[in-house]
Image (tube, helix red, strand yellow):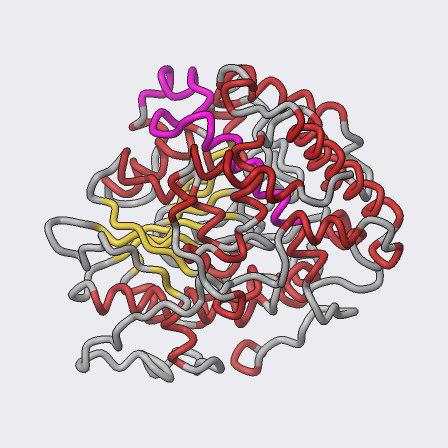
Amino acid sequence: MRFDFAAGVALAWTLVSPMAYAMAVPRTNSSTNSDSGLLSVLSQAVGDLSVGQKTSDTASSILSLLDNQADTPNSAADVGSVKDAHDKISQVYSSVDKDSDSLLLDLVKGLVEGGLIPLNLVNLLDGYINIDLNSISNNNPAPPSKQDLYPKKRSDDAIYSIPEEKLRAAIHIPDSFACGKNGKKPVILVPGTAVPAGMTYHFSFSQLGKALPKADIVWVNIPRASLNDAQTNAEYVAYAINYISAVSSDSNVAAISWSQGGLDVQWALKYWPSTRDVVEDFIAISPDFHGTDLRSLDCPLLDPLVCTPSIWQQGPETEFIHTLQSDGGNSAYVPTTTVYSTFDEIVQPMSGPNASAILSDIRDIGVTNNHIQTICPNQPAGGVYLHEGVLYNPLAWALAVDALTHDGPGDPSRIDIDTVCGQILAPQLQLDDMLGTEGILLIALVEILTYEPKVGQEPSIAGYAS
């Protein structure tokens, strides 16, 4: 293998990507675990049996496949149409053993092998640690003096354990943010496990303004790619909710989450009740409110006896999940829209009455639990969408827009179902966005591998929740 592969793809990416012009940030300011680029981490895994033979062999295979792409450069156009790409993703999913401990590894390898992570995406993924979209050192002003958000906003809020400066600096606010003016609605994007927020949403909901111009997007770059204790991850979410409301003239806000982000938002709503006063909508994409039976699929990337804190916490019978669900935490605190897919490779089960994404509504707040295969049966939008694929699913986008433009949660009965279910990709997105979203699985693999220190059990429950 040529060791100059990363340099060889740099020019190709620069020529095609607006992200190539994003400001680089020092590694210490990034919400990542890795000190090196994606390709470097994979190279280090080759021959390193401490990561496991399967992981080492898969890393070698992925690098060889990417190296071959450098010899015969491809782009999204070479993948074909959106339908071609979706068919290939479905084929990759069909080809892997769903019960294998190496499911995530096999899926990533299959995506690369199928040409679904083309050359003009590789360099972006390789350099993700240095992109300012993932920064945790954002220079945000203090909240208005009349707003006392720290150490708690309301007497019944939990006390933050993280310094306010760090909580505030993790919020990425684009220059275009209108602070609630001109009819704009602040929308906070919350990331999932093992992928920084900037990269998670670059190819999907950061572009929500194309579908809903009044959506004013910000996101929370939770340190260490949300692999730390989910209880501390939720502190960043709780603070961001109240902070964005405060700097937006006390406007109500919406939260869109992916994966573990749903747990983080729900934990924040439960233990920082002040957030419920300002969250108008909660839209949870591929959430695991009840944990996942597949936690073990992530941890074999490491020694099976150790893992990262938040992955430990997402097992179905953990103290974290039990604590969240107790005392009404399994029910919505604000109008909530969940969207999920049977074919989720990370969270299971994701169909039927026991789907992990389902949230109850004992308070009669307003909840819709939207299983895409039920709403769009045997139609394109109800096809094979993986954990990350729901981020670009057209029904997910239509429900998000519906929720943000009506009182209460997103309602499928208000949507042009025939049109939406006939689509594969949200119409505001392009093929590059679909492929880029699938590519974040490579980042997740690297983040899980490089997280230190590994732990042998889930963290203890915080005193305020005990």
- Report if residue 257 is visible in the image: yes
Q: As drawn, is 443 to the left or to the right of 426?
A: right
Where residue 141 appears, as percent x and y from the top left, is 26, 74
- Report if residue 379 is visible in the image: no
The magenta region covers: 416-445
- In this orientation, which residue lies closer to the viewer: 41 or 10? 10
Determine whether 357 is above or below 386 in the image.
below
- In this orientation, which residue lies closer to the viewer: 451 or 465? 451
Determine whether 245 is above or below 66 in the image.
below
Image point (30%, 50%), residue name = 217
Where residue 400 appears, as percent x and y from the top left, is 35, 39
Decide whether residue 437 is among the magenta residues: yes
Where residue 132 appears, as percent x and y from the top left, is 42, 58
In the picture, which quadrant includes the N terminus?
top right
Residue 145 lies in quadrant:
bottom left
Determine whether 193 is above or below 70 in the image.
below
Q: Main secondary structure of the magenta part?
A: helix
Decide whether residue 218 is among the magenta residues: no
Residue 166 lies in quadrant:
bottom left
Where residue 289 appears, as percent x and y from the top left, is 56, 53
Determine whether 94 is above or below 223 in the image.
above
Image point (44%, 52%), residue name = 198
Q: As drawn, is 286 to the left or to the right of 155?
A: right
Q: As drawn, is 207 to the left or to the right of 435?
A: left
Image point (70%, 53%), residue name = 41
